[in-house]
Amino acid sequence: MSLAVGEGLSVIEDACQAVGADYPSASGIRKAGGIGHAGTLSFYPTKNLGGYGDGGMVLTNDAELGRRLKMLRVHGERDRYFYDHIGGNFRLDALQAAVLRVKLRHLPAWQEKRRALAGAYRRKFAETGLVDHGFVVPPDAVYQSSGAADYHTFHQYVVRVKDRDRLQAFLKENGVGTAVFYPLPLHLQNCFAGLGYQEGDFPVSERAAGEVLALPIYAELKPEEQDAVVGRIAEFYNR
């Protein structure tokens, strides 16, 4: 943030999967979405705070930017039928707002459950010996309760694993759903081919793309279901 300000740049923060997260800064603990000049949230149904359909929000501490954003969400309208900017129809509909107002009250409890599950994953993987043998590398995060200086929301629980593709296929065969976010790094995507990057130019990103695997995590995940996930992974590596 300080680097961007020093260069005269604005920071637009993508907090779409981090609602509720805390981050320690020189000025104290900051909330995700409130660190940059503007922060964005998504209320897509799969997010930690999801609506019944699509929607989102922009956060800012800048009064002038907030005023302009409010205009842009209603076609750039300053007063009824008077337009200062070219905007769009970006209003959150009443149904989504009603759903989100109810769910927002439950978000802290849901986040704590996700964090408890993340801590349990880390503990269970350590108990199997998979971590010591380097088969599974859990995320390096702090698992304290709310109020900690580093508060992770675990929208996803992503581990790095050996032989990722064969493990994922094995888990699918045994009824365990997983996902890969994302299988191809940006510099190898077709849309950026014009930049001229080749495979091997960013080896750290390429290695991560080949190792990451997102495991099931949501507030209602049962302990026995989590045990089954860890057990199947242990079964794969112990064959």
Image (cartoon, rainbow, N blue to C red):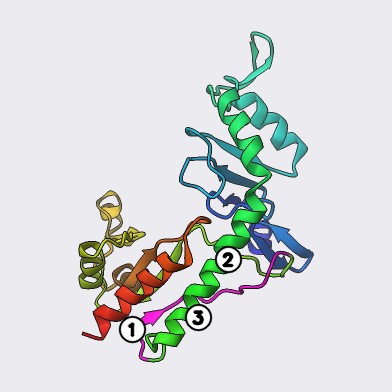
Q: x, y percentage for residue 136?
A: 37, 80
Question: Tag on residue 176?
Answer: none
Q: Amino acid at mark 3?
A: Arg
Badge 3 crowding class, 10 Å Cα cut-off, few under 14, some 14 to 19, many 20 or more, is: few
Dot 2 corresponds to which residue? 115
* Secondary structure state at the residue bearing disc 1: loop
Q: Tell which of 155 and 185 is nearer to you.
A: 155
Q: Is residue 172 left or right of residue 153?
A: left
Q: Tell which of 27 and 85 is nearer to you.
A: 27
Residue in the image at 63% along x and 50% along y: 107
Mark earlier in primary sequence (1, 2): 2
Q: Is residue 197 left or right of residue 107?
A: left
Mark earlier in primary sequence (1, 3): 3
Quarter of the image where the C terminus is located: bottom left
Residue 181 shown in magenta: no
Q: Amino acid at mark 2?
A: Arg
234 in relation to 199, above or below: below
Dot 3 corresponds to which residue? 123
Q: x, y percentage for residue 8?
A: 65, 53
In this view, the residue farthest toward the top is 81
Span of residues in magenta: 133-146
Q: Quadrant of residue 92?
A: top right
Question: Tag on residue 135?
Answer: 1
Q: Is residue 216 visible?
A: yes
Q: Quadrant of residue 35?
A: bottom right
